[in-house]
Image: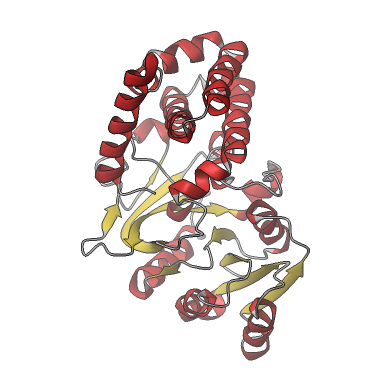
Amino acid sequence: MKLLSIAIPCYNSENYMRKCVESLLPGGEDVEILIVDDGSAKDRTAAIADEYAAKYPTIVKAIHKENGGHGSAVNTGIENASGLYFKVVDSDDWVKEDAYLQVLSTLREQTGIDKVLDMLVCNFVYDKVGEKRKKVMHYRHILPKDTLFTWEDCHHFIKGHYILMHSVIFRTKLLRDNHIRLPEHTFYVDNLYVFEPLPYVKNMYYLDVNFYRYYIGREDQSVNESVMISRIDQQIRVNKLMVDYLVEKKSEIIRNKRLYQYMRNYLEIITTVSSVLLIRSGTEEALQKKKELWQYLKGKDKGLYVYLRHGIMGGAMNLPGRGGRKLSVEGYKICQKLFKFN
């Protein structure tokens, strides 16, 4: 059995996927690299996947499937993983070798102890085109370092500082046993990937290394703001699924105060992003969708709605009139500069 399975969802990725794969090969026989070709048809993605699988048959596996979107490729990775732990690395991203080796060493150490490690957290770096200083997202003041801990041991997560797909490695069996499965043909499902497993995560470990390099800069990238606006219905779908999930699980999650606070605040961030993108769209249809999203939340859980609607971010997203919407956007821009997203 492998120590770590790494899924690389690929869709027409020939221009950058080699850098990703090459950064993962130093893991050697401890790792299994699953290159998931998600129905690529316009370039040599499939051929490159087969090339690596032939060259490194004990490390790389090429999986070819019909196009189903990023979530479908992640699902396929989970289904085919043979490693104790599971990681997603997008095809335009890469990992830093020294940190990577430390990650593998930590996972190896944790396999020999009585308590089961459910989630490993590391830092990631926003590798944004044109930025000389790269923003590092770390958790030094939030999570205990170099030890197993639970949700009760976590400190308060500040706004805009959350555990993203780039940060986490999950125990494979946890994902499978709890039927974590992402929607197909939908963007932004990475938010569900780092949300739905959390009630099942008991033991965590934070390794303070800058492991993952998150590339931002392609014009067609899904997190590009104009692209997000064009796909706003998919963002809203994910947002509503997160509402549904938190409401459904609330009775069991709320007993764990720190976990519930974290998940509620993460939902607040996603709802804020949805709201401001709808404001930025500038159409009456988009503003109606924004109103409907908040009404959806209210209909699902009035207490949760009141908390989000009257919090700092929810209040800022619902200021009245054209002037209020302009202030909402300006506040969002400040957050963009601070946290380097989009």
User: On the rendered structure, is 342 left or right of 183?
Assistant: left
Please determine whether, in this image, residue 108 is positioned above or below residue 300: below
Please determine whether, in this image, residue 116 is positioned above or below residue 249: below
Q: Percent position (x, y) of residue 180?
A: 67, 44
Q: Residue at x 56, y 21 (%)?
A: 288
- Front-lying residue, 331 or 33: 331
Colour mode of the rendering: secondary structure
- Front-lying residue, 105 or 327: 327
Q: Residue at x 60, y 20 (%)?
A: 247
Hey, which residue is sitting farthest right in the picture? 66
Image quadrant for the N terminus? bottom right
Q: Percent position (x, y) of residue 235?
A: 57, 38
User: On the rendered structure, is 179 left or right of 96?
Assistant: right
Q: How many marks?
A: 0
Hey, which residue is sitting farthest bottom in the picture? 55
Please determine whether, in this image, residue 158 is positioned above or below residue 177: above
Hey, which residue is sitting farthest left in the picture? 133
Instruction: Kindly tell me whether residue 290 is visible in this rendering.
Output: yes
Q: Percent position (x, y) of residue 335?
A: 29, 38
Image quadrant where residue 234 sits = top right
Q: Percent position (x, y) of residue 215?
A: 41, 63
Q: Residue at x 27, y 55 (%)?
A: 135
Instruction: Kindly tell me whether residue 157 is visible in this rendering.
Output: no
Please determine whether, in this image, residue 22 is positioned above or below residue 64: below
- Front-lying residue, 16 or 5: 16
